[in-house]
Amino acid sequence: MKREKTRIPIRLKLFLPVTMIIIIVISLLTVWFINTSINRFNEHIKNTLVLEVNTITKMFERESMLKLEKVQTNLKVANLQFYKQPLFISSDTLHRIIENQESKIRHKAVLNKWYLNDILLNESTAFVDSLEKIIGGTITVFQKIDSGFVRITTSIRRPDGNRASCTFIPKHSPVALSILAGETYYGRAEVIDEWYTTAYEPITIDGEVKGMLYVGDKEKDMAELKRVLKTLKIGKSGYVFVFDKNGKMLIHPYLEGEDWADRELFKEIKESGNGIIEYVYKNTHKTVAYNYFDKFELYVGASINDKAESRQFTTGAVIGATIVGLLSILFLLFFIYRFTSEKLYRYFSALQESRKKLADTEIALRHSEKLAGMGQIAAGVAHELNNPLGVITMYSNILLEELSVDDPKRKDLELIVEQADRCKNIVGGLLNFARKNKIHPENTDIIELIKASIKSVVIPGNIKVTTNFNIEHKHLMIDRGQMLQVITNLIKNASEAISEKGQISIDISQKDENVLISIEDNGNGIKDEHMDKLFTPFFTTKDIGKGTGLGLSLVYGIIKMHNGKISATSNADPKAGPTGTEFKIILPLNHNKTTES
Ligand code: ADP
Ligand code: MG
């Protein structure tokens, strides 16, 4: 029972800090793991986003290349068709109001009449229209004038259905400059909301640039492009968008046509050209990767909603990591509890036990010091009293012998002799007590010794003495005389504690390397408050003349000198159960050495 009591707190004491440390460490690890996982995931999403934008840009790039090739072919076809027929530049003139296509400023101009195969190009669209049918792209013939190159016939129609003739490209524009230098010009142009890949080639007569031929092909079919880009799904929430160079949203799932020129996002995109940014749009955290595609002058972007992307992953990571963390904690705790704490526990309980032993020894030491001190005083007093007492006894006995049998003084003298004897007894006991600081062990039959003790005590008839000897080695190395005193004293005390009918049981048994002697009675018992004074010299509860209080201290001293232990348990309260006392002596079996103290 006692063992169980101390077992739990020690276990807990050991286990709690270890548990706390494990929980803290694993929790930190779990949090760290969740964090890194989420960061990695976000990183991964960003990479995907960048990759996506790059892919779209590549798509554009390829489209642009294809367009360029097509325009080159178109130009060849147009060239063939144009020069297949005779061109005649008449000195007849036409007066026209022409419009600068950049500044929109108009002025009067005088144009020469151009005849292709005898058809006045300035007033016929037959050539450009038939050519458009062949090449599937737009075509324009320009005539060189002082201010630049003016369209004299074109297949391009304005939204109102009219042709765009009589508009001119000013002579300082890149196109005009190339052509004047005799070079073919490739470029792009926005014509009525559509982008065209364009090619211009000089019309040279007698080494002089007289005009130019233009072919254009729709860079991309916006509707088709939108359809393709809108089917692109990026992650769970992502989509693609496209700005033109002026910040107009060309493609977007729901913001198409919006002007973003003044928005921070567009400004940033425009400034860096390509990269990745995070921004908040209507309380939603977004990450946007973007890239500028110079050939189309477009900004391609891909955007995702951070939370929507990582929510599922985060929940998964948190739940997963928490479960793993908890399992690890349980496993580790189980492991530690099973293996480590068992060892630690044993170590600590051994420590506790030895501490208790130390404390017991200290108490015993103090006790024996006290006894030794008392013994010295007692020896001194007894010695001094012994001689005068001897004189009193001797002379009172002589006097008694001299008196006749019926002498009236006889009674008084007898009382003196009796009391002097009592005093001698006390003094004898004291001397005995004081002298006992040495034992002389001899091979002694403990059973025989117990039997002799029982015989030497006068036990009233109302008390029954039972013995139970359960011992293998009955021969012990003990001081026979002193041990006899021990047993006798204990039996005497027991019989004195029994007032009416009673029983004294004497048991001898063996446990490990010890002999256990138990002397138990069912007498009145010892009150709790007397328990710690039992072995103190002169402690007695008996009437004057009956007890000296030296018996148990003598017993204690002798047992100690035999390297033994003595303890008492008792109940003096009839309400708490049957009363009685048990004295237990433990003697080491292999007590071979003579002990002196
Ligand atoms: P004494 O017997 O002379 O009183 P002891 O030292 O032998 O001195 O005993 C001290 C006291 O211990 C006794 O007075 C008694 O109160 C108590 N005592 C000892 N043995 C017993 C016992 N078996 N039952 C009850 N009380 C006891
Ligand atoms: Mg006694």
Image (cartoon, rainbow, N blue to C red):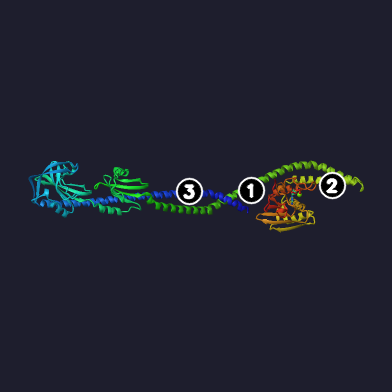
Q: Secondary structure at mark 3?
A: helix
Which of 541 and 214 lies nearest the eye of the viewer?
214
Percent coordinates x, y for residue 36 in the rendering: 41, 49
Percent coordinates x, y for residue 121 in the rendering: 11, 49
Percent coordinates x, y for residue 155 in the rendering: 16, 51
| Neighbours of disc 2 within 10 Å: few (<14), some (14-19), many (20+) | some
Residue at the far front in the pictured view: 160
Which of 119 and 182 lies nearest the eye of the viewer?
119
Q: How far separated are the C-alphas under marks 2 and 1?
A: 47 Å
Q: Are marks 3 and 2 in contact (CB under 8 Å)?
A: no
Is residue 411 shown left or right of residue 180? right
Q: Which mark is residue 204?
A: none
Task: Say whether disc 2 or disc 1 marks the residue closer to the N-terminus.
Answer: 1
Q: How far separated are the C-alphas under marks 3 and 2?
A: 85 Å
| Neighbours of disc 1 within 10 Å: few (<14), some (14-19), many (20+) | few
Mark 1 — residue?
A: 357
Looking at the rendered structure, the kind of residue marked 1 is Lys
Residue at the far left in the pictured view: 91
| Neighbours of disc 3 within 10 Å: few (<14), some (14-19), many (20+) | some
Task: Say whether disc 3 or disc 2 marks the residue closer to the N-terminus.
Answer: 3
Residue 444 in view, yes or no: no
Looking at the rendered structure, the kind of residue marked 3 is Val
Q: Secondary structure at mark 2?
A: helix
Mark 3 — residue?
A: 25
Looking at the rendered structure, the kind of residue marked 2 is Glu
Q: Please identify, in this view, whether the residue under mark 3 or under mark 1 is nearer the observer.
A: 3
Mark 2 — residue?
A: 418
* Picture quadrant of residue 277: top left
Which of 51 and 112 lies nearest the eye of the viewer?
112
Q: How far separated are the C-alphas under marks 3 and 1?
A: 39 Å
